């Protein structure tokens, strides 16, 4: 997403500083990488935002930045994570919304850690369940996308998949009802692909796994930027399926699943 990339010196600005869309941020990251940084290969799939969130949460959880600590200046912190300042600012804005960090103005202002990422969880997380769910989801979604892309879909099937993809682009607020509605629409999109494989066992496994993933997602803050990014990835998956590009569809599905995994591990995995 294209963001104002000037360094604020003592941290990042407030949420009002975040003003553009997801595609431009990835472009900004690519430009910065070309200028000298070498991002790990798996991040080139478009999950730079989710990676940044996960890295910030991990640093806070491991005590690199304690509650009450002021984070390093924007330029320095972006260099540590190996992302653009635009992406860093976007990620910090979402963590501010989630209550993990706060922004103070003035001479001694900056971005400060407000609480630990898992401070609002009443029950512990079964890390075995987390690991199993995200890894099995990756296998299922990748296989389903590859199978459907290799099929010759009927006009009705293409229309059903298009409707499921476009339905996710609903106007989204912050109410519990809005969040539940998006979860349902997102699940419908992924289950539509699973059903279009024509393999009932795969579709059944995908439905069960989606329910497990949603239960885990319910335990982390709702990240609006990730929703926008997810919808864009949905559109690319559908495009690859309609182009009968099985490998591209599988790769895009894997990248999409990995983005969700990074957020879940960032918030829930205490490692």
Image (spheres, rainbow, N blue to C red):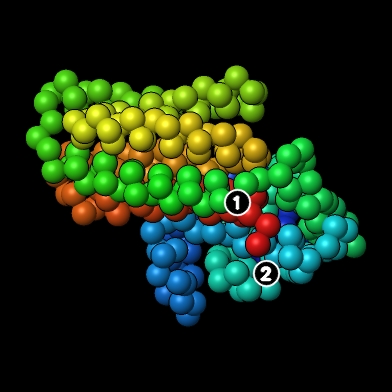
Identify the mark at residue 77; answer none if there is no mark: 2
Quadrant in the picture for residue 222: top right
1 or 2: tag closer to the N-terminus = 2
The x, y position of residue 35, in whole percent, is 46, 77
Residue depicted at 28% across the width and 36% down the height: 202
Residue 187: quadrant of the picture: top left
Q: CA distance from mark 1 to mark 2?
A: 28 Å
Question: Is residue 182 shown left or right of residue 60?
Answer: left
Q: Position of residue 104 (x, y in %)?
A: 85, 53
| Secondary structure beneath label 1 | helix
Is mark 1 in CB contact (under 8 Å) with mark 2? no
Q: Residues within 10 Å of mark 2 (few under 14, many from 20)?
A: some
Q: Which residue is mark 1?
A: 127
Q: In the figure, 12 relative to 130: above or below?
A: below
Question: What residue is shown at x 67% (from left), y 53% (from top)?
Answer: 92
The structure residue drawn at horizontal position 24% and vertical position 53%, both measured from the top left corner, is: 248
**Residue 238 image offset from top left, x and y in percent:** 26, 38
């Amino acid at each position: 997403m294209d963001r104002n990339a000037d360094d604020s010196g003592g941290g990042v600005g407030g949420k009002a500083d975040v003003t553009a869309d997801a595609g431009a941020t990835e472009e900004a990251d690519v430009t910065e990488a070309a200028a000298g940084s070498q991002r790990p290969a798996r991040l080139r799939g478009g999950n730079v935002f989710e990676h940044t969130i996960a890295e910030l949460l991990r640093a806070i959880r491991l005590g690199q930045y304690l509650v009450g600590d002021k984070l390093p200046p924007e330029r320095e912190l972006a260099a540590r994570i190996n992302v653009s300042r635009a992406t860093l600012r976007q990620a910090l804005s979402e963590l501010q919304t989630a209550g993990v960090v706060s922004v103070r103005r003035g001479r001694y202002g900056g971005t400060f850690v407000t609480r630990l990422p898992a401070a609002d969880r009443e029950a512990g997380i079964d890390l075995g369940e987390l690991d199993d769910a995200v890894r099995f989801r990756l296998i299922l979604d990748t296989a389903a996308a590859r199978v459907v892309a290799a099929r010759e879909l009927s006009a009705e099937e293409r229309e059903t998949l298009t409707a499921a993809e476009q339905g996710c682009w609903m106007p989204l607020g912050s109410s519990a009802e809005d969040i539940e509605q998006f979860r349902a629409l997102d699940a419908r999109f992924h289950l539509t692909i699973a059903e279009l494989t024509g393999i009932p066992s795969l579709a059944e496994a995908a439905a069960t796994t989606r329910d497990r993933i949603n239960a885990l997602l319910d335990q982390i803050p709702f990240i609006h930027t990730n929703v926008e990014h997810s919808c864009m990835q949905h559109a690319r998956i559908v495009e690859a399926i309609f182009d009968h590009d099985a490998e591209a569809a599988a790769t895009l599905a894997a990248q999409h699943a990995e983005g969700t995994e990074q957020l879940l591990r960032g918030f829930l995995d205490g490692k």
